[in-house]
Each structure stands twice: as structure tokens, then as C-alpha cells.
Amino acid sequence: MDVYYFYTYSTAGWMALQAAPLLVSPTMIVTMLSPEVREPSTLEAYFSRCLGFSLVTIGVLTVLLTGSVPLSSRLSSAASTDPSDPKAPYALPTLTITLFFHAAHAFYTYAMWTQTSITSFALGTVFSGALAAIGLWCILFASSDGRISRKTGADKRTSGFPFKNAEADKRKGKKGM
């Protein structure tokens, strides 16, 4: 599986996993957050379920807008991150927004973990931090159209500075320079 697809599906899965307790049982969330055990108010249940639906919606939109799911009737058209690709025109902006979401979430859960030492915040930090790192990798490397030479298989944008590329010079016939 490509790292790009892994990132989009992992983002959707992580958001769905976070949304599940919010949707299923607002009572459990209020019980975990408040010092006394009580039923959630109508407003608390509304906000809990609204946040759960929002997380699921953002996860689904991430998968759709990045082109991971082909929206055409032909299965032969594969999704790519190429900006000129009409199948995924919003891939790079969606990746950027989800990267910022995961980075902010990792920072917040890390801050909460250092204050409270609760293990679930540490797990949130690890998962969101890993997804932020993968998202950054996808933006830096999976979204650029590399200039790969058909002859040598090397990237044409690389430079010989500060070291000389003796192997490439041999192929070009510039021996001894």
C-alpha cells in the first residue's frame, strides 16, 4: 500500500475511532470528565454527538477529497497527488489541513499528558504525532512530480555540490574531471 493511501485511510480511521465514544455514549464521556457521576445535560449530549459527527465527516471528506476513492465509474483511473490530475484537485490542500490538525492534536494531547500523566493522552500524542509525520512526508515527497531521468534513473534536480558524482561523469564520458 502506498504511504499516501495509508495516510488518508489512517486519518479517517483515527477520526472515526475518536468519534465512536462521542456518538455512542455521551454519558461515558461526561462520567470520565466530571468528578461526580451524573447524567449528561441535553447540551452536553448535543455537543458530544455533534463533535462525533464532525470527526466522522472530516474523515470521510479526507478520503474523498484526496482522491483515495475513485469517484468515476471507471476503475482503471487511479488517484494521484499530481496537481494537474482532475481526479484529485484538492489532494494537497486536504493533506495540508489534516497535517495541521494532527500536529495541533498531538501538541494538545502532549500538553495534557505532561499535566495529568494519563496514558490515553500519551497514546493520542503518539498516534497523532505519527500521522502528522506521515502527512508531512506525503506533502514533501509524495506530492512533487520528481524529475527522474529515464537513462540513469536519478533525480535530475540533484546537485553535485559539495561532492563530485564520479559515476555520472563516467557515464557522460567526462572521465578524470
Image: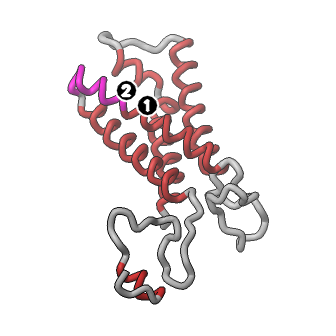
Q: The residue tagged with tag 2: helix, strand or loop?
A: helix
Q: Which mark is residue 40?
A: none
**Amino acid type for the residue under numbered disc 1:** Ala
* Magenta stretch contains residue 116: yes
Q: Look at the numbered discs 1 and 2 and tell me whether their residues touch, using CB distance below 8 Å.
A: yes
Q: Residues within 10 Å of mark 2 (few under 14, many from 20)?
A: some
Q: Residue at x 40, y 25 (%)?
A: 28
Q: Position of residue 114 (x, y in %)?
A: 23, 25
Question: Closest to the observer: 97 or 50?
Answer: 97
Q: Residue at x 55, y 65 (%)?
A: 146
Secondary structure at numbered mark 1: helix
Span colored in magenta: 107-117
Label 1 crowding class (10 Å Cα cut-off): few <14, some 14-19, many 20+? some
Disc 2 residue type?
Tyr
The disc label shown at residue 108, or none: 2
Would residue 87 be counted in the magenta stretch?
Answer: no
Q: CA distance from mark 1 to mark 2?
A: 6 Å
User: Is residue 111 depicted above or below 78 in this figure?
Assistant: above
Q: Residue at x 42, y 81 (%)?
A: 168
Q: Which residue in the rendered view is the most extreme toward the front? A: 177
- Residue 155: where, in percent of width, then height? 50, 70
The quadrant in which the C terminus is found is: bottom left
For label 1, the residue is 104
Q: Where is residue 117 shown, x and y percent of the image?
A: 21, 26
* Quarter of the figure with residue 132: top left
In which quadrant of the rendered view does residue 84 lie? Answer: bottom right
Q: Is residue 147 left or right of residue 161?
A: right
